Amino acid sequence: MRKYFNFDELGTNYRREIIGGLTTFLSMAYILVVNPLTLSLESVPDLPADMRMDAGAVFVATALAAAIGSLFMGLIAKYPIGLAPGMGLNAFFAYTVILTYGIPWQTALTGVLFSGVIFIVLSLSGLREKIINAIPSQLKFAVGAGIGLFIAFLGFQNAGIIANNDATLTGIGDLSQPATLLAIFGLVLTVGLMVLNVKGAIFFGMLITAVVGMIFKVVPIPDGVIGAIPDVSPTFGAAFQPLMNDPASLMTIQFLVVVLTFLFVDFFDTAGTLIAVAQKAGLMKGDKLPRAGKALLADSLATVTGAIFGTSTTTSYVESTAGVAAGARTGFAAVVTGVLFLVSLLFYPLLSVITSAVTAPALIIVGVLMVSALGHIEWNRFEIAVPAFLTVIMMPLGYSIATGIAVGFIFYPITMILAGRRKEIHPIMYGLFLIFVAYFVFVQGR
C-alpha cells in the first residue's frame, strides 16, 4: 500500500493521510444535507409531487456518488481529492432545468448521464484538455464567480434574508422570523469559524446551528442518530427512462443546452480544482499536472455513476485543499474520504434537523469562496470586462446559470472583434456563439 501510493517519495505516512482524508470529508460533508434539499426543491412551496426528487433517495445517491468518485480518484489517479455532487451544478439542475425549463428530473438526470459519457470520451481521447484550453481564462473565472453569486443568492433567499418585493423585485425579508434569525446566527458563526481557519468550518457551522435550532424549537428533534438506509429505488436508473420511454424529448435545443451547460461547468470546475489542490500539495511538475488524464477520467466515471444512482453532476471538490493542508499528499487520503461517505449512509435520521435555515449559511459561504475568482479578471480591458460582467451578473438576475454563460459567450466574440483582437478568438468560441444565440431564439424566446 505504501509503495502503491508512493508514501516514501512524497514524505507522508498513514497517520497524515488518514487525518487529511477525514479533514476533507468534514469539509465536504455539508453536501449530504444540501444536495437532497436542493434536488427535492424543498425551499419551493406548492410544487406538484412529480417535480420533486425523493430526498431520501437523493441522500443515498449523493453518498454513493461521493464515495465511489473519491475511491476512483484515489485508486486511479492517486490524488488526495474528494468528489461529490457539485454545488452550482445541483442548483442549475434544480432551479433552472426542473423549475424554470419545466424539464422532468428524470430527463435532467439523462442530461447528466450524457455529459458524463461525453466526459469519458473526451478524457480518453485527450480532447477534454484541448476544449478547456480553447475557452479564454477570463470567462472561466467569470463563470466560477457567477455561480458563486447565484449560490449565495439562493442562500439569502432560503434564509428569508432576501424576499420578494413587488416594488423593487427583491428586498430585505422579515428578519424577526425565527428561521431567519437562526440562519443569521449560523452565518455569523460560520464566518467566524472560517476566519479562525477551523477545519470543517462549514460542516461544524451547520451542526452547531442545528443544535441551537433544536434548543429554541426552530427545527425538529430527530427520532434517532443511526437508522435504516433510505430506499434509492425512486431515483436509481431513472436516467434511462427518457431513453426508453420518450427519446423525442431529448431531441431539442433546450436539452442540448442542458447537456452543454453540465459539460462546460464541470470542465472548468474540475480543471481548476485539480490545479489548485496539486499546487497546494506540491504535486505540480513545472506547469503540468501529472496523471491529468487519469484524474479527468476518474471525475468522468464519477459523474456517470452519480447519474445512474440519481444525482446531479459529481465533480472534484476544492475543499480537498483543507485535507492537503492537514497533511494529505496521496490518493490514500481520497480513499479514506470515500470510505467515510459510505459510513455516512447510516446517519440519515439526523437529516430531519437540517432545514433551509441551517443550510443557507453554507450556501452563502460557498458563494463567497467562489466569487474570489473575480480578482483574476482583467477589468481594465473593456472588451474583457463586458462579457465577464454580463456572465457574472446574469446568473443571479436571470436566476439561471445557463443564461449567464450564454450572454457572456455571445458578447465575448463581439467585443473582441470590435477591439481588433479577432486572432485571439478560438474557433470553438464561434461555435458556442451560434449555439447560445439559438438558445435564446428557440428556448428563451418561445
Image (cartoon, helix red, strand yellow):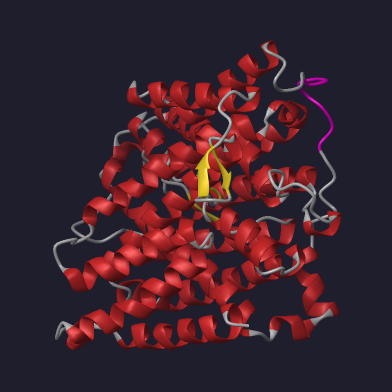
Q: Is residue 228 magenta?
A: yes
Q: Is residue 388 left or right of residue 156?
A: left
Looking at the picture, does residue 250 appear above or below residue 209? Answer: below
Image quarter hosting the C terminus: bottom right
Relative to 133, is 279 above or below? above
Q: Residue 21's x, y, as percent?
A: 48, 34
Residue numbers of the magenta segment: 222-229
Q: Can residue 128 be found in the magenta stretch?
A: no
Q: Is residue 219 visible?
A: yes
The x and y percentages for residue 425 are: 25, 83
The residue sitting at 28% across, 72% down in the picture is 136
- Relative placement, left or right, of 198 versus 306 is left
For residue 70, above or below residue 269: above
Residue 245, compared with residue 304, is above or below; it is: below
Residue at (49%, 46%) from the top-left corner?
A: 153
Residue 200 visible in the picture: no
**In-front residue for pair 29/296:** 29
Q: Position of residue 108 (x, y in %)?
A: 68, 67
Q: Quadrant of residue 103?
A: bottom right
Please state which of residues 445 and 142 is positioned toward the viewer in this rendering: 445
Q: Is residue 428 left or right of residue 262?
A: left
Determine the main secondary structure of the stretch shown in magenta. Answer: loop
Residue ID at (74%, 44%): 60
